[in-house]
Image: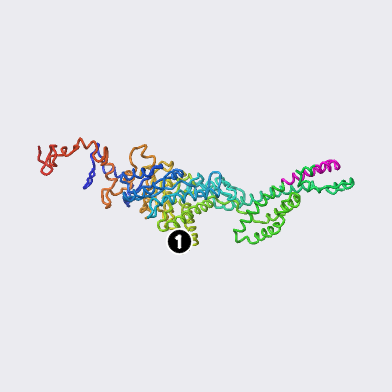
């Protein structure tokens, strides 16, 4: 039985648990995190004032205002966030903010769209501005997920090879055509045997070559199709125009004149032209109508080819323009532009369809000399690029508007396997690129020095590390050591921590110490984990078990009971007796029968009427 010097344990509800057993609830960390670093989330509701007030009444010192539903955030009036800030000051608590779940890249299962990314940026900026209302004087931490759309661009698993050695492999790689927004999948689990293309399952060492090959084959296929269309159209037009002089001779012999064939084609819908065609057909045996039909058929092919030519020219030009090593190819395309520019107006005239067909064929030959553009790029690289645009622009906007009190944009790893950029290496790369873009734009926009811009970037852009989310890599064959390794990779960028436990399979969100998340090992990796505020995310615990996960978390961490960081710790007392606040508040119902409901129920030695022994001498008293 534990002993206490100045803590009132309440009444015992049966046999107490021995101290040796209660120690098992602790993660036995060297670092004893104080209760002031732990917080809880508010429920999903528009009435965040009541939600925060309810949490404050429990005595918790850190509260994360949570609006992960984008629509729910817009239901919260601005006055409510201002009032929450007043509650914060009155109660002396700290606030953090979980922003809405927004796909920062602009991706969806239908592909990518530039407008979607810009819309995502506006939503995140709106959340940053709303979050600033919660703490206008400080740098409130605002968490956003790195990815929301259920797309993993390069999923990894861990397997054992034929020798029993563990190795990490990539199951497939997604690539994307930025111009069209389409995805393509490169499977990697099949072994390749063809000479020069040999590959073991999961090997990504040649992935760049495979993507290059895909781009080459795609470009050549499109060129071949374009060339075929142009050739077919040109052939129909040539057949249609063949024998035109013979038709004119027939008309001259009859003493008649008529418009040239392509003029007939151009103005075919004109009633007067149709009368003329009918008359000429009577003299030529219907040959004019037949010729116009052939030209019209060929025109469909030619104009489709012309549309494709313009699209492919744009893709090729964009590639060479962004590549300083493509000066020769860019010169070829510039020359073609210069030659065709004055012809475009005439070429679009239906009476010049034969000339258009020849120009399309010439354009195809020019494009054949160009290095295939990078139509498809690795989706992971693309997502990091687009998400970093969104987050860096949001951070830049926040600094521009709020200066030194700008909120901290903290990017969270989503549950492993459910969304992109959930692994530490990817999240770290996203943060680094976001910070670099912030520095570049801050120098240009605000005239800041490199050092000043970098200082603000490091301050305002970081990571929220969810220990439960990363633990889910275990279902893909990874071990506890791998989970700790992930945390070590992201540690230098950590601003904030989310706590939940699980068994590495499902996103169960248990209190810490109740699953197999290596919390102790993670927290002892880096001071950022120790100093960061830790938000308990155990949404499903209370409905099932009807107890607060806060006590369980403090117990797991072995947090000191008192603010002066002295014993006892929560793991020593949490499970030894009934809670002080059990039952009807500060005076539980069991205490009525033991100690009485008022002063008269106290022992005589304390001024009451209950007989007992003297607390000094032990002598019976009446």
Does the magenta stretch mainly form a helix, a strand or a loop? helix
Asked if the stretch drawn in magenta spans residue 290, the answer is: yes
Q: Does residue 526 show up?
A: no
Kind of element beneath mark 1? helix
Q: In the depicted view, which residue is nearer to us: 233 or 366?
A: 233
Q: In the depicted view, which residue is nearer to us: 200 or 317?
A: 317
- Where residue 36 appears, as percent x and y from the top left, is 32, 50
Q: Does residue 413 show up?
A: yes
> Residue at label 1?
453
Asked if the stretch drawn in magenta spans residue 234, the answer is: no
**Quarter of the image containing the N terminus?**
top left
Residue furthest top as drawn: 593
Residue furthest bottom as drawn: 449
Q: In the depicted view, which residue is nearer to us: 88 or 587?
A: 88
In the rendered image of this protein, does residue 622 appear above or below residue 204?
above
- Where residue 207 appears, as percent x and y from the top left, is 56, 51
- The colour scheme of the drawn protein is rainbow
Residue at 60 percent of width and 53 percent of height = 374
Mark 1 is surrounded, within 10 Å at the Cα level, by few (under 14), some (14 to 19) or many (20 or more) other residues, namely: many
In the rendered image of this protein, does residue 481 appear above or below residue 591?
below
**Quarter of the image containing the C terminus?**
top left
Quarter occupied by residue 75: top left
Q: How many tags in the picture?
A: 1
Quarter occupied by residue 592: top left
Please give the range of residues in magenta. 275-300
Residue at 34 percent of width and 37 percent of height = 546
- Where residue 322 appears, as percent x and y from the top left, is 59, 58
């Amino acid at each position: 039985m534990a002993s206490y010097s100045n803590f009132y344990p309440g009444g015992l509800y049966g046999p107490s648990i021995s101290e040796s057993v209660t120690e098992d609830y602790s993660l036995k960390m060297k670092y004893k995190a104080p209760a002031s670093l732990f917080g809880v989330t508010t429920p999903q509701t528009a009435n965040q004032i009541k939600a925060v007030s309810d949490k404050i009444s429990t005595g918790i010192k850190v509260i994360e205002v949570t609006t992960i539903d984008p629509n729910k955030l817009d239901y919260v009036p601005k006055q409510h966030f201002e009032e929450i800030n007043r509650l914060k000051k009155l109660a002396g608590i700290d606030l953090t903010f979980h922003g809405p779940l927004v796909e920062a890249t602009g991706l969806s299962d239908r592909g990518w769209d530039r407008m979607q990314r810009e819309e995502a940026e506006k939503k995140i900026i709106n959340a940053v501005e709303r979050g600033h209302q919660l703490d206008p004087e400080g740098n409130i931490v605002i968490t956003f997920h790195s990815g929301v759309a259920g797309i993993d661009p390069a999923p990894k698993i861990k397997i054992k090879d034929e020798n029993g050695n563990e190795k990490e492999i990539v199951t497939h790689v997604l690539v994307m055509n930025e111009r069209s927004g389409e995805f393509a999948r490169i499977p990697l689990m099949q072994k390749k045997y063809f000479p020069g293309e040999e590959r073991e399952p999961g090997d990504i060492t040649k992935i760049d070559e495979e993507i290059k090959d895909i781009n080459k084959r795609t470009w050549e296929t499109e060129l071949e199709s374009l060339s075929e269309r142009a050739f077919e159209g040109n052939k129909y037009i040539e057949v249609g125009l063949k024998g035109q002089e013979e038709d004119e001779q027939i008309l001259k012999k009859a003493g008649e004149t008529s418009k040239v064939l392509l003029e007939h084609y151009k103005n075919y819908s004109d009633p007067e032209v149709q009368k003329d065609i009918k008359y000429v057909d009577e003299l030529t045996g219907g040959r004019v109508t037949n010729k116009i039909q052939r030209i019209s058929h060929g025109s469909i092919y030619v104009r489709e080819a012309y549309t494709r030519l313009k699209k492919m020219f744009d893709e090729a030009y964009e590639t060479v323009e962004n590549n300083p090593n493509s000066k020769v190819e860019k010169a070829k395309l510039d020359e073609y532009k210069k030659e065709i520019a004055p012809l475009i107006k005439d070429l679009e005239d239906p009476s010049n369809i034969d000339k258009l067909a020849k120009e399309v064929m010439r354009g195809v030959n020019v494009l054949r000399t160009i290095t295939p553009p990078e139509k498809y790029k690795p989706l992971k690289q693309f997502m990091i690029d687009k998400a970093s645009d969104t987050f860096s622009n949001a951070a830049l906007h926040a600094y521009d508007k709020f200066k030194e009190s700008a909120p901290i944009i903290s990017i969270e790893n989503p549950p492993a396997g459910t969304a992109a950029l959930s692994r530490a290496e990817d999240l770290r790369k996203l943060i680094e690129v976001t910070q670099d873009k912030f520095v570049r734009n801050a120098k240009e926009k605000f005239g800041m020095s490199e050092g000043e811009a970098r200082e603000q970037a490091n301050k305002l852009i970081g990571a929220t590390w969810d220990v439960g989310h990363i633990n889910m890599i275990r279902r893909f064959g990874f071990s506890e050591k791998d989970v700790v390794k992930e945390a070590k990779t992201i540690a230098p960028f950590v601003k904030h921590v989310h706590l939940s436990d699980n068994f590495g399979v499902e996103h169960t969100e248990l209190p810490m110490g109740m699953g197999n998340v290596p919390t102790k090992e993670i927290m002892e990796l880096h001071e950022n984990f120790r100093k960061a505020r830790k938000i308990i995310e155990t949404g499903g615990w209370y409905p099932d078990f009807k107890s607060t996960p806060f006590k369980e978390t403090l117990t797991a961490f072995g947090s000191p009971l008192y603010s002066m960081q002295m014993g006892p710790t929560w793991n020593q007392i949490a499970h030894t007796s009934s809670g002080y606040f059990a039952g009807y508040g500060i005076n539980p119902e069991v205490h009525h029968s033991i100690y009485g409901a008022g002063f008269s129920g106290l022992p005589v030695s304390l001024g009451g009427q209950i007989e007992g022994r003297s607390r000094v001498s032990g002598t019976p008293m009446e």
